[in-house]
Amino acid sequence: MATPGFAAGAYASINGLGAGTLMKKPLAAGGAEAGGPDFSALLGKALDATAEAGRKADVQTASVAAGRADVVDVVTAVAESETAIQTLVAVRDKVIAAYEEIMRMPV
């Protein structure tokens, strides 16, 4: 699922979230679709993609140890996994920084 363009794919998936989209109020619970994608769903997809990249790297590593895969495939899978983890950590850091900034705001 994860590719070398994992970060670009993640950014492209939220490309439609402009300021106008973020300012829309969600509809009622029983109503139609909300103003934009659910943040928790986007975060869940990113976590799933990161976990899948790690599993793929593990499978490739086991395959090369058994002599069934090429070392280039292992290096590519590990690089994809590393990129996915770095992207996830960067997003986590931004969320924490935003939370800390909100907590510093006067009420």
Image (cartoon, rainbow, N blue to C red):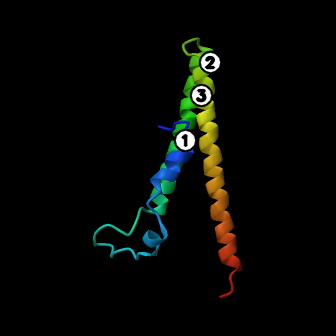
Are the residues at dot 3 and dot 2 in contact (C-beta closer than 8 Å)? no
| Residue in the picture at 58% in, 11% down | 67
> On the image, numbered disc 3 is attached to which residue?
76
State the image coordinates of residue 5 (x, y, percent, origin top left): 54, 40
Question: What separation in Å lies between label 1 and label 3 (alpha carbons)?
Answer: 16 Å
Q: In the displayed structure, would residue 105 be above or below residue 20?
A: below
Say what amino acid the circle numbered 2 marks. Val
| Residue in the picture at 68% in, 77% down | 103
Question: What separation in Å lies between label 3 and label 2 (alpha carbons)?
Answer: 9 Å
| Residue in the picture at 33% in, 76% down | 28
Q: Residue furthest left?
A: 31
Q: Residues within 10 Å of mark 2 (few under 14, many from 20)?
A: some
Q: In the displayed structure, would residue 84 be above or below residue 43?
A: above
Q: Which disc is residue 71 wearing?
A: 2
Q: In the displayed structure, would residue 102 be above or below residue 4?
A: below
Quarter of the image for residue 93 reads bottom right
> On the image, numbered disc 1 is attached to which residue?
51
